Amino acid sequence: MNRIRILTFLLLPPLLAPTARAVENHPPLANPVLERRYQHLTEEIRCLVCQDQNIANSPAPLAANLRYEVRRLLFAGASNAAIKHYLTRRYGDFVLYKPPVQPDTWMLWFGPFALLFAGMTILLLLLRQKSRLYKREHERTPAS
Amino acid sequence: MKKRSRYLIGAIPLVLATGLLVVLWAGLSHQPSIIPSPLIGRLAPPLTLPRLAHPDREVTPMVFRNHVTLLNVWASWCVSCQYEHPTLLWLKRHGVRILGLDYKDHRIPALAYLKKYGNPYVKVAYDRRGLATINWGVYGTPETFVVGPHGHIRYKYVGPIPLSVARRTILPLVHRLRLDESVS
């Protein structure tokens, strides 16, 4: 009995997984290159209604509309950069999951490294001071 | 000298902690559901749609010509739009020209809604599938834009407009735009 239950739990997620991904309301694009670009783009574009989901996975109606727009632009021959530009011009940079590197996001991109550098510098200074004090004491003790 | 430098080093954590506190404090009042529109200051995107009550007629970008106009995105299924509705009627009473944009709706319930709650709009554009409004960066209802007489977007409000915002921000803005951007 217990074994069956465990088996069910193990088998259930893979069985449910296809339905969880099935927010697509269209068959895959006939052109495999476009389909790959479509997959890639929809994973990098944020749904603005449920903001922690990309439009590839969001069941929100707005996400369906944005997927439709991406497909339309792909068919029209737009490049990936052009499609992203099209969306950021309307919704702002927030629509991209990966924020672009620009002055107002420098803090986001480089802040952690700056903090790490500052911490290392302070640590180094403190250690050098400590070792200097230690050395001075050490030199003095045997003499006295 | 030595003592002073030690005080300075001791002050570093305090400065960092204060900085963090300021950032976190600011974060408390930040509402992630309100996304600032990149459209402000730019020309209004194209808007050509059939009208709600007259399917054979169209709303065209000419609708913004020579008037300060509020573009209000709404739907009959939208509960917070009902909440906002008295504010729109108040703005209409104060002489504000409001263009409606019915979003992902059906004609019959939308017309019934306007009959029941009153119609604050001069015209209503009907976007059945919600695809035309992507050009406006609309991601929900209600959303309201203020468009100047030359067709520039000057302001956007996301969510139901409280009466206080209508009185303190939107109405003065409409009056100012009428003077500043008036067409000779």
Image: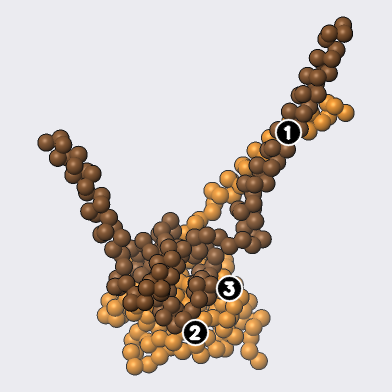
Q: In the displayed image of the protein, which residue is found farthest to the left?
A: A1
Does residue B110 appear to the left or right of B159 in the view shown? left
Quickly name the residue at label 3: B40
Give the colour in which the image draws chain A. Answer: brown
Answer yes or no: is residue A86 visible: no
Give the colour in which the image draws chain B. Answer: orange
Q: Image point 70% across, 41% down: which residue?
A: A118
Asked if the residue under mark 2 is in contact with the one under mark 1, i.e. CB atoms within 8 Å, the reply is no
Q: Image point 77% across, 24% down: which residue?
A: A131
Point out residue A134 in the picture as x, y percentages from the top left corner.
78, 19
Mark 2 belongs to which amino acid?
Pro
Q: Image point 49% across, 79% down: which residue?
A: A78
Which of the two labelled residues, at mark 2 and mark 3, occupies the earlier sequence position? 3
User: Disc 1 sits on a residue from what chain?
Assistant: A
Distance of label 2 from label 3 (alpha carbons): 15 Å
Distance of label 1 from label 2 (alpha carbons): 60 Å
Q: Is residue A133 above or below residue A61?
A: above
Does residue B98 appear to the left or right of B3 in the view shown? left
Mark 3 belongs to which amino acid?
Ile
Q: In the displayed image of the protein, which residue is found farthest to the top?
A: A144
Q: Is residue A49 above or below residue B15?
A: below
Residue A53 quadrant: bottom left
Q: Nearer the viewer, mark 1 or mark 3?
A: 1
- How many marks can you see? 3
Mark 1 belongs to which amino acid?
Leu
Point out residue A68 in the picture as x, y percentages from the top left corner.
38, 75
Quickly name the residue at label 1: A124
Structural crowding at the residue carrying mark 1, measured as other residues with C-alpha within 10 Å and reported as few (<14), some (14–19) or many (≥20):
few
